[in-house]
Image (cartoon, rainbow, N blue to C red):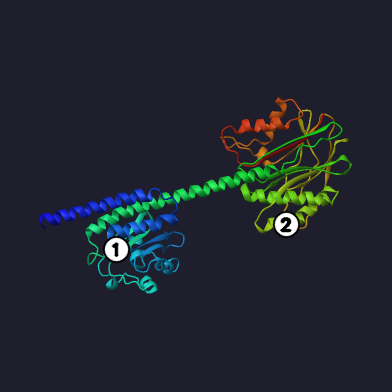
Amino acid sequence: MGDRDNIAADSKVADRLKKLIRANQSVAHIESLEELLPVLLDLVRDITDAEASSILLYDPEREVLSFAAVKDEVLGEKAEELLHGSVELRLGEGIAGWVAQSKKAINIKDAQNDPRFSKEADRKTGFVTRNLLCFPLLYGQEVLGVINVLNSKVKPYFDSEDQDILESFADLAAVAIIRSRLLESRLQQQKLEIQLEAASKIQAMFWPKLPEMQGGSRAWAVSRPAAMVGGDLYDFIPAPGGQWLVYVADVSDKGLPAALIMAALSARIRSEALVHREVGELLEAVNRAMYDIMSEEGFFATILFGKYEPITGRLQYVVGGHFPPVWIKGKEIQQVPPLKGISLGLTPNVEYEAREILLSPGDSVLFLTDGVTEAENERNDLFGYGALRDYLAKSEGPPWGKGLLDAVDAWRGAAEANDDLTIVEIWRS
């Protein structure tokens, strides 16, 4: 080769390297995978002087390669329309399948006579593949897909120089695809966080104002989800004669699904409270109404439901799969009449029996969810009734609720909340 030929060859290599650098700069600013792939194909077709180029992405769940983007200077956009979603290759099937399975590049000089070549794409488009270069798109050992260039426009077939430049471009494309996926994933995460934040604000609107009661009775309540939204709920509902309906409920699971069930349950309880005066009948009606909604997706809810008379301190209560009220007299937890009941949503026809306690001046009653008793510290020890008794022995009350919340937080320490937490307290001063 003469000096002039060497100079021309060096100039061509330098030109290709410049194009590769420009390609790197171009794709660095593109965040969407949908926008990225066509740009990649235009660049690789330009760098290798090919008639067409394509990217097939690998779906690991279905174990197939499918056309994600196609660039053809003859057929234009029609080629992608014909191939996108209609042609799929299993690992080992066709040239692309062989490359993806072996994770090795291949240079086919005579595609039509290669036994591995699949002619389905050519049949779909009318394109005639004479020669092709196919490289795997790898991220470590993970197969992302393959990239093809078809039919060299300036040579009988692609040569080692084309292979070298496409290998560099395949590495660039793989990194760009991973980056785009990470950015899209982060964008989706940010959207979800915004939605959850909005849901959290909406859920907070369900918490009622603390009622002003007669006869020296007072109330306090708090509910904190383990995540941004949760499945705990409580309410104070005014009833005839100055009485109050009060409850805490704990929907199975946490997060947004539980919060949606919580909202439906809250609305249903308030609706049934307008019709039923007896707490047992009210809960039976709520269970019947909620059964279809909850059971279909496997949800259920535990509940402690009561009707309180502020003047007398009389509290009627029913239990649905929940632990009973914590009745505190002095600094001691008093035994309450035992009561059993099935959680809401497990079976449509349930009868709930009511029990009754009488709060004297100085007494307090706590309605708790298991986010209190089952709060875990860094050693995975449970708060339990033992720590509750220790708190009562060391504290002055009533009220006890705010101090109990602080005691649970101190017990948990640096450990993350493992469940939603709700405390409702009624006491007589």
Where does label 1 land, which residue? 50
Q: Nearer the viewer, mark 2 or mark 1?
A: 1
The mark that comes first in sequence, 2 or 1, is 1
Q: Nearer the viewer, residue 245 or 46?
A: 46
Quadrant of the drawing holding the C terminus: top right
Q: Label 1 sits on what residue type?
A: Ala
Q: Residue 118: give x, y in percent of width and height.
A: 35, 71
In the displayed structure, 86 sits above or below 209; it is below
On-image quarter of the N terminus: bottom left
- Identified at 67% across, 36% down, the residue is 384
Q: Between residue 7 and residue 269, name the one nearer to us.
A: 7
Residue at the location (24% across, 65% down)? Answer: 157
**139 lies left or right of 343:** left
From the image, tell me which residue sits under label 2.
Answer: 291
Q: Is residue 239 left or right of residue 14?
A: right
Pointer 2 local density, CA inside 10 Å: few below 14, some 14–19, many at least 20: some
Number of disc labels: 2
The residue at the point 37 percent across, 74 percent down is 123
Q: Secondary structure at mark 2?
A: helix
Residue 175 at least partly seen? no
In the image, 191 versus 21, the foreground residue is 21
Mark number displayed over residue 62: none
Side of 1 relative to 428 (left or right) = left
Query: At numbered mark 1, what does the secondary structure look like: helix, strand or loop?
Result: strand
Task: Find residue 306 and report its horizontal and vertical position in percent.
Answer: 80, 43
Q: Nearer the viewer, residue 310 or 158?
A: 158
Q: Please indicate, yes or no, whether residue 239 appears anywhere in the rendered image.
A: yes
**Residue at (11%, 54%) from the top-left corner?**
3
Label 2 amino acid? Tyr
